[in-house]
Amino acid sequence: MTPSARLSAAIEIFAEIEARRRPATDALKDWGLSHRFAGSGDRAAIAGLVYDALRRKSSAAWLMGEASPRATLLGMLRRERSLDTDAIAALCSGSRHAPSPLTQNEAAALATGALAGAPAYVEGDYPEWLDPHLKRVFGDERAAEGAALASRAPLDIRINTLAAERDEALAKLQHLNGEPTRWSPIGIRMRLAAAAKSPAIHAEPLFIKGQIEIQDEGSQLAALLANAKPGEQVVDLCAGAGGKTLALAAAMANRGQIYATDLDKRRLAPIHARLERAGARNVQVRTPTGRGAGSDVLADLAGRADLVMIDAPCTGTGAWRRNPDAKWRIRPGALAERIKEQHAVLERAALLAKPGGRIAYVTCSVLPEENNDQVEAFLAHHSEFSVEKSVDAVKALGERAYLFARAALISGEGLLMTPRRTETDGFFVSVLRRQSS
């Protein structure tokens, strides 16, 4: 397919997403099934255009003066891809399979390329209803933080230190142009071009042998900040597919015990194969036996855990780079529901932590209601817990600790990573320690 034909296809798919409020992955899959002539490179390029349009949906529409699918895609080419008017006009030639030529108004808007007078939620490309929430945490920097959350994410992998070392893995992944992650001592980052296909990491020998895992650097850091030690008793309350469970097992060098569970046993399904592939031998998976039975499978661990890891259910606002259509589908009701779930999981954790033990509360959200407010509410009802100072928690990062502490947004309740500040997904981490008896 020509670049012009790819742009036409992207406009068509974006119209389908907007008209039917469909997840982008579903719309892209259906288009691919009904247009089998499109090769894998074409499908990857079209998906890149669609996702970039979702990233810059609000600012592109403001730039063009309208929010039609065509206007959004054209505005995105200017905003995200930095194409000038002539380059965009060349794509819109009106020839076979190409979009129709630019109108005078479109050409004028693209030539301006500015967002004069745009409010913060337009500059930052996030839903208007979230503006007061983001203002609470970022103030006048919320537009810049939102814009960074709308950017394309790199591909990060974590070295499984049970089976490999980073320098060794870097040498074997030279063909993917990997580089050491900025903060995590066990990460590798691959920066992807706008129209590039993601590398087939799952087909790499290192992955097949369990020596690497796909994991954002921010998620790696959250596990490192929990500071799980060999020999400890650890509970992973919201283990899901096991990303942080695997990281904790490696940090503990397979010594001690991890109890991995989740209220939804369907989310635990992939963890067994991942544990086996990674060679993680110190993990017991405790699967709920029925609805609401998640707490029963941990009854024998009350007051025994050195560490309770909470990878809390959240709105996912910190992961918008990887799921850009999610931010346009999130609603206030979803935030209220996540807040209830977070409160419940913190209460479960309080019963499990032993005297002197700790809770690592982690979200992939940047909203204060899910982060600082939850910690404050928890402490108000649990005077036996206190927040471990972030400057102490980051010592787990070794020589990188000082610079990381300066980059992250530190508060009395924990620390917040963002794409703009730490070049990671948005993650909040708070370590809560129970006083010794």
Image (cartoon, grey):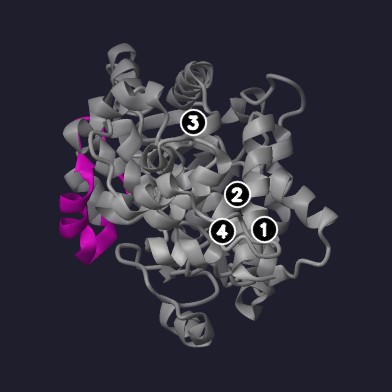
Q: Which residue is mark 1?
A: 274
The residue tagged with tag 4: helix, strand or loop? helix
390 relative to 330, above or below: below
Sequence-wise first label, 3 or 1: 1
239 or 307, nearer to the observer? 239
Proximity of marks 3 and 1: CB atoms separated by less than 8 Å: no
Proximity of marks 1 and 2: CB atoms separated by less than 8 Å: yes
Q: Which residue is mark 3?
A: 315
Q: What numbered label is drawn on residue 48?
A: 4
Work out how far the residue at label 2 is from the one at label 3, CA to CA, in angstroms. 19 Å
Sequence-wise first label, 2 or 4: 4
Q: Which residue is mark 2?
A: 242
Q: Is residue 402 magenta?
A: yes
Q: Amino acid at mark 3?
A: Thr
Where is residue 56, by image quadrant?
A: top left
The answer to whether one can see residue 132 in this image is yes
Instruction: Indicate the position of residue 291 as horizontal and vertical percent values.
Output: 73, 20
146 or 70, nearer to the observer? 70
Observer-side mark, 1 or 4, equals: 4
Instruction: Indicate the position of residue 41 as horizontal and vertical percent values.
Output: 67, 71
Proximity of marks 4 and 3: CB atoms separated by less than 8 Å: no
Is 375 on the left or on the right of 252, as rendered? left
First to last magenta residue range? 396-418
Is 292 on the left or on the right of 416, as rendered? right
36 or 218, nearer to the observer? 36
How would you rate the neighbour count of disc 2 (Cα within 10 Å): few for under 14, some for 14-19, many for 20 or more? many
The residue tagged with tag 3: helix, strand or loop? loop
Work out how far the residue at label 2 is from the one at label 4, CA to CA, in angstroms. 28 Å
Q: From the image, which quarter does the C terminus lie in? A: top left
Is 406 on the left or on the right of 431, as rendered? left
Sequence-wise first label, 4 or 3: 4
